[in-house]
Amino acid sequence: MSKIERSRPSDDALRKELTEEEYHVTQEAGTERAFSGEYWDHKADGTYCCVVCDTPLFDSDTKFESGSGWPSFYEAIDEANVELQADHSLGMRRTEVVCGECGAHLGHVFDDGPEPTGDRYCINSAALDFEDRDASSMTSGPRRCSTRPARVFEIAFRSAKPQLTL
């Protein structure tokens, strides 16, 4: 079976650039408390991106109120931008969602969501940045959360192409 190796910034760089909670959630597969994150009841129109590498993950048009206390979406912007992995931690059988670009832990996906997909991507706010649709329409090039301050380690993700190993 083949595996993609991602270029990633050093642990020190991640600790410097991410908040303690962002680091815990994205790098240690942590979970923020329900109803505590910035985006659980966020209703603005735009794109939710990976807090680590800026990859666009979810569109606000697919966000819905699940009652869970975490941002919930029924579909990713692009299936290549998220990876699903088996998660058997804590004695449960779940499907973990990680960023397809940098491998950051985002949350979990469940099969109790609304139509048209039936999926509920239950995502930690700490794993997300948000770009308002008006701001994103003014940028050109690849779709990214480009209006937020640049993080020094973004270059590590964009300059190195993933290597396929067998």
Image: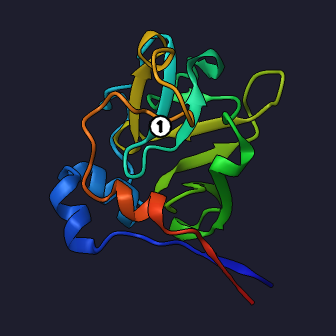
* Residue at 30% across, 59% down: 153
Instruction: Tell me which amino acid carries mark 1.
Output: Cys
Query: Can you say which quadrant of the picture contains the C terminus?
Result: bottom right
Q: Position of residue 149 (x, y in %)?
A: 24, 36
Q: Secondary structure at mark 1?
A: strand
Would you say 119 lies left or right of 141 here? right
* Residue at 60% across, 56% down: 100
Would you say 39 lies left or right of 100 here? left
Q: What residue did someone put label 1 on?
A: 49
Query: Can you say which quadrant of the picture contains the N terminus?
Result: bottom right
User: Farthest residue toward the bottom?
Assistant: 166
User: Farthest residue toward the front?
Assistant: 140
The image's colour scheme reads: rainbow
* Residue at 52% across, 26% down: 140
In the image shown, does 38 or 46 lie closer to the viewer? 46
* Residue at 51% across, 15% down: 137
